[in-house]
Amino acid sequence: MDDPRDIRIRLLRGLLRSPLGLRLVRALLAGRPQKPHHHVSADFFLEMARGAYASRACPVVWSNIFVPSELFWGLGIVPFFPETWAGLAASMGLSALGVSQAAAVGYPIDLCTVHRSAAGLWASQLFPRIDAGVATSHACDLAGQMLGNFAYAQGKPFFLLDVPQDDDDASVDYLTVQLERLIAHWREVLGIDFDPDRLREAIRLSNQARALALEVATLREAEPAPLRGSGMRDQLAMLTAMFGHPSGVRYYQSLRDYTAQRIANGQPEQTHQRVRLYWMHLMPYFESDLLFILEDELGGVIAWEEISTLWWEELDEREPLRSLARKIASLFFNGPIQRRTEMALRLIQRYHCQGAIHFSHWGCRQSAGALYVLRARLRREGVPLLILDGDCIDPSNLPLGPLRTRLEAFMEMLV
């Protein structure tokens, strides 16, 4: 008798690789209660899936999330982000499948579960073809190692962008040269044409989306908070995939209008609001009562999330590659920890937060490894920090009982 898990995998493979199957998925998603901007993001990611799985019109490049998306859209390449799709799989209840399959093929348990789940989904042949791979060296060392492994295992070329720990002019010059080499590499191995006008158009679209996203950020200063912070857990995917694509403009315009309407009508998404909080790092992508307890039971308001922060300056379409190089280097996770802590303090002040919560995702060294310095810096400014150990992918690694106790004590202290 077939293993039910094997049957499920075969069914998923068929849906992902069939245009009709993808239309079925979109129809099912349309049946769920959604906000206007969710319709835009669902259509965008299904368009990406169609290009990656069901079409051979454009090359598919696997990438970590910090290679600028403008580069892909400006070169006519379909990007595939294993980290993003691991989070999407978790939201669809596929975490156990990814993690168990990764264990079956030998990936160690101490690896970040985002990458472990991605490895398991890849081993299950649930990821699309790969024509080439690329990654940046900063923020997450493991991302480049995993992507290099995926590419080499299938005999495909891989390119690593070496990111300096500073964003000064010399560092930007160094990265710009690498981006030029990357494009030359892709022209050779993928057969793409480099159209400067198309890249400039991607830059223009990115700047339009950026301006709208900044308007959303300003609207969220309102009290009471118009949006639920838990509803913004997907923002890292939007910031790293949509910019440079027309959907990015539509998405942030829709989100801006929705937020402004909530404020104008006096209808915040979260009615019970007691304490404003700054949330650091990721949130669980799967269904969990953790954020329900914080928001609805305890009245904790996630006024702003670290991952929602748009970190780069307006791009210059006259120097598109240099602008994208500066975007890479200026990421707040890159360089000295002071860059991240000072940004946190600015945002805590801007959104009138009484405290901060850091969700320490299992296996994520780059974020959790700096907590001692981060906590000490916030403490000097009188900002209490609660550290929650958990997992944004694997529900079995999120102990709700102890986390509830710590949340209750923290909120009691702040009130």
Image: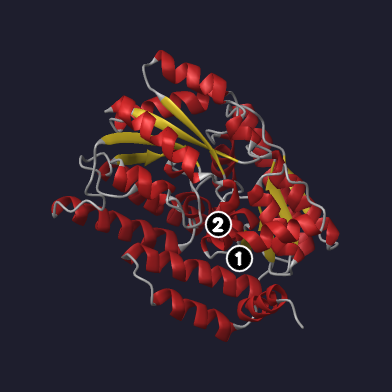
The amino acid marked with disc number 2 is: Leu
Inspect this view and state whether residue 293 appears: yes
Tell me the kind of residue under disc 1: Gly
Closer to the camera, 333 or 162?
333
Q: Identify the residue under disc 2.
A: 199
Which is nearer the N-term, disc 1 or disc 2? 1
Looking at the image, residue 150 sits to the left or right of residue 370; the answer is right
Q: Which residue is mark 1?
A: 76
Q: Where does the C terminus fall, quadrant-wise? A: top left
**Residue 351, which numbered label?**
none
* Nearest the eye: 258 or 399: 399
Q: Is residue 228 left or right of residue 360?
A: left
- Residue located 63% across and 50% down the image: 114
Q: Position of residue 77 (x, y in %)?
A: 63, 64
340 to 238, vertically: above or below: above
Give the residue drawn at x 64%, y 28%: 165
In the image, is 249 to the left or to the right of 139?
left
Return the residue found at the far top: 380
Instruction: State the separation of the CA atoms marked 1 and 2.
Output: 9 Å
Task: Give residue 127's quadrant in the image.
Answer: bottom right
> Which label sits in the foreground, 1 or 2?
1
Q: Is residue 313 visible?
A: no
Residue depicted at 61% across the width and 80% down the height: 15
Q: Is residue 229 above or below residue 407?
A: below
Q: Where does residue 169 sit, x and y in percent of width and height?
A: 59, 28
Within 10 angstroms of label 2, few (less than 14), some, or many (20 or more) residues?
many
